[in-house]
Image (cartoon, rainbow, N blue to C red):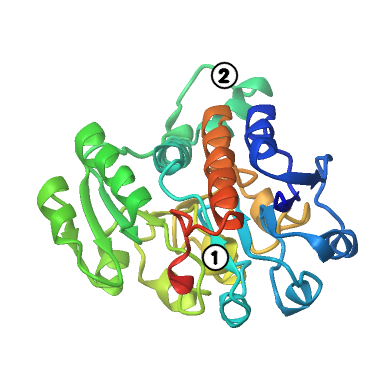
């Protein structure tokens, strides 16, 4: 009997065809997220689930007695209750690697956009405010030869460091749970404590996964350590930052600006003060959002899913479930 899987996220037709070769499946075929109750009902006879976000917790597992694997179409997997899954023997996978370069591109878009005030000045020109005369008030800051601090030197962190070092001649430092001596030798980056990195950097990029240890890793004390000329970039998860503290630091001029692809609440509240600040570049969590990268992520997630329901150990099992 063929395994049964549920696709709680739209995937490209080629990816769906691959799944159809190996599994019987049902799917949620709308852009909006599947309602929780409907998802729970769909899982009663499913061996596998492909999803992007949404809490995989004890309640869901109780509704899915046959479930063998949850395949996350994401590099992050903070939506997985890995402890509960481990007790039940349910595998969990993610999609690392395929999005590294694309996310690194987005990071540099935010760095350049915030440093040179590109979104702000685009609006300035389109509003007809560009006049002859002194233009000191629209100056930005240089990116080349500046000091970049990366918090979280994983694969994406290394891709950012390569762009910074070899594309912009930046001085790159990093903070990580463990030293990355190979990266230091290969890329010429230097290790710093978190405090030293925050104090020295002209640009601070937060690139950590969301865990209990990294929740609100950047708060009032950390922001107070930064230069008042520094720019903060977050492309990790919104909950890694104390958002109220960030708003306060920006309002008081403790830091120069920010570039954000993630927020504590997503979609972000239209009344969020960050959206009103001209020195903050805001994106709708699109770090990996190119057609090719999202296709590659979906295909990798499908490969993980199929291997899992066939009784094999998938290649991208999350660390806590190995």
**Residue 126 location (% of width, % of height):** 66, 21
Would residue 94 be seen by someone viewing this image from the given angle? yes
Residue 246, numbered label? 1
Q: Is residue 262 left or right of residue 31?
A: left
Q: Is residue 200 left or right of residue 21?
A: left
Quarter assignment of residue 207: bottom left
**Label 1 residue SS:** helix
Q: 9 or 191, which lies in front?
A: 9
Q: Residue at x 25, y 41 (%)?
A: 162
Badge 2 or badge 1: first in the primary sequence: 2
Residue assigned mark 2: 131
Residue occupying the far top of the picture: 132
Q: Quadrant of the C terminus?
A: bottom left
* Mark 1 residue crowding within 10 angstroms, few (<14) / some (14–19) / many (20+): many
Mark toward the viewer: 2 or 1: 1
**Residue 226 location (% of width, % of height):** 36, 65
**Residue 223 location (% of width, % of height):** 43, 69
Q: Is residue 188 above or below residue 145?
A: below
**Residue 94 location (% of width, % of height):** 52, 55
Q: Residue at x 47, y 59 (%)?
A: 313
Residue 140, numbered label? none
Quarter assignment of residue 319: bottom left
Q: 167 or 289, which lies in front?
A: 289
Residue occupying the far left of the picture: 185
Q: CA distance from mark 2 to mark 1?
A: 33 Å
Would residue 77 be seen by someone viewing this image from the given angle? no
Q: Is residue 157 above or below residue 320?
A: above
Q: Is residue 321 left or right of residue 168?
A: right
């Amino acid at each position: 009997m063929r395994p049964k899987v549920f696709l709680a996220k739209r995937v490209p037709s080629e990816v769906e065809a691959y799944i159809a070769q190996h599994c019987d499946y049902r799917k949620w075929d709308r852009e909006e997220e599947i309602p929780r109750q409907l998802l729970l009902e769909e899982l009663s006879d499913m061996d596998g689930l492909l999803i992007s976000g949404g809490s995989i917790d004890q309640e869901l597992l109780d509704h899915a007695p046959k479930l063998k694997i949850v395949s996350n179409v994401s590099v992050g997997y903070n939506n997985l209750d890995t402890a509960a899954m481990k007790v039940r023997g349910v595998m969990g996978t993610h999609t690392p690697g395929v999005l590294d370069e694309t996310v690194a591109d987005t990071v540099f878009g935010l760095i350049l956009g915030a440093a040179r005030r590109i979104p702000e000045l685009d609006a300035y020109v389109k509003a007809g405010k560009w006049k002859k005369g002194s233009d000191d008030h629209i100056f930005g800051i240089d990116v080349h030869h500046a000091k970049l601090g990366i918090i979280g030197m994983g694969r994406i962190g290394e891709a950012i460091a390569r762009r910074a070092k070899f594309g912009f001649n930046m001085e790159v430092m990093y903070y990580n749970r463990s030293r990355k001596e190979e990266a230091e030798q290969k890329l010429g980056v230097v290790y710093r404590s978190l405090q030293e990195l925050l104090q020295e950097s002209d640009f601070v990029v937060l690139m950590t996964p969301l865990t209990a240890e990294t929740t609100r890793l950047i708060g009032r004390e950390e922001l107070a350590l930064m230069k008042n000329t520094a720019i903060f970039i977050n492309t990790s998860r919104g909950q890694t930052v104390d958002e109220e503290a960030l708003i306060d630091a920006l309002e008081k001029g403790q830091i120069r600006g920010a570039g954000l692809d993630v927020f504590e609440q997503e979609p972000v509240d239209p009344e969020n003060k960050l959206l009103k600040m001209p020195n903050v570049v805001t994106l709708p969590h699109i770090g990996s959002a190119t057609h090719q990268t999202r296709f590659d992520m979906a295909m990798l997630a499908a490969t993980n899913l199929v291997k899992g329901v066939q009784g094999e150990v998938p290649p991208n099992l999350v660390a806590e479930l190995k």
